Image (cartoon, rainbow, N blue to C red):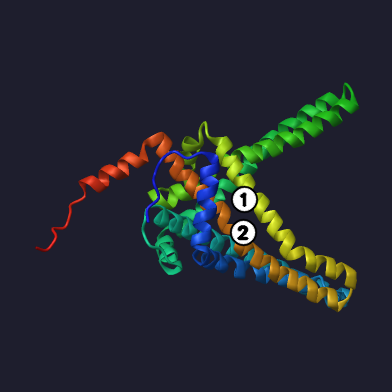
Amino acid sequence: MQLDLRPLTLAELLDRSFSLYKRHFWLFVGIMAVPAACGMLPLVSMRIFRSPVARTIPPEKVLMYVLPAAVGLIIFFLVYMVVYMYAVGAASIAVSDLYLGRDSTIGSAYRRVRPLGWRLVLLFLWTLLSIMGACLLVGVTAAAVAYLVSFVARPLAALVAVFAFLAVFAVFVWMTVRMGVSVPVLVVEKVTAATALKRSFELTQGNAGRVFLIVLCAAVVAYATALIFTGPFSIAALAAGPETRTALLFNIGGAISGAIGGMLSGPIMIIGLAMVYYDLRTRKEALDLELLLENVDAPRVAEPT
């Protein structure tokens, strides 16, 4: 059934996000299972490559093994990011359907995101370059200030360096939050990647704190889940001895278990940000009234007499 569209408090946003995830658990887990399976392959490969067996390779043949492995990991990473962005878009479409009272399935969500897939990949690249560029600008400026201050007092330069690190981290968080609803914007409004980023900045203006708390809550859940799913395997591998085959098996088990944990915790942030998107549009653009008028103006089918 369609949820009532109205401005929500932060507590209501969190409650609706978790309730929607709980009611449609297998839908969202199924959507995120695709990138989880894709991301598990390079993790397992890395564990095997770093194993004691791999270290017995003769020095003259190391390059022969390292170069293909490095190229393979890069390809795996690129493929994973494409698949992940498709999954994020599909999950956002599923949230939109459920939020507006429409049915959604794993297959239908992926089918509908297919035409928007490369826009999502471009959105990821634009987001990554924007965040890296902003952080680099702040970091270079702070480094120049620290260098000039070092001529006056070296201890003061060290203090400037600490503040510089905090400033770079603050810029990273701020940019991430302001771009947080760009994926829902793109898949719901079917706009370009650049327009989605611009719209995200407009919608989050004055509401960055709400988005930040949603992201923070989801990040805490994801971190706790990763700790629960991978922690026991890491401890067991350490107890068995880092150089043993038993440790290798535990590390591989940890990689697989971590992928499962990511599959379970990943949808929470996507659902939360999609909820925030609809809440911000309701607050700023009266989306609730717009949809109400659309339903009133929609032609009704005459009932049989």
The image position of residue 224, as x and y in percent, is 71, 56
- What is the quadrant of the N terminus in the image? bottom left
Image marks 2 and 1: residues in contact by CB distance under 8 Å: yes
Specify the amino acid type for callout 1. Answer: Ala
**Residue plotted at (49% across, 43% down):** 197
Side of 204 relative to 98 (left or right): right
Identify residue for label 1.
218
- Against 260, residue 137 (above or below) is above
Q: Secondary structure at mark 2?
A: helix
**Residue plotted at (43% across, 57% down):** 93
The image position of residue 232, as x and y in percent, is 79, 66
- Against 214, residue 154 (above or below) is above
- What is the quadrant of the C terminus in the image? bottom left
Q: Earlier in the sequence, mark 2 or mark 1?
A: 1
The image position of residue 121, as x and y in percent, is 52, 56
Specify the amino acid type for callout 2. Answer: Ser
The label on residue 265 is 2
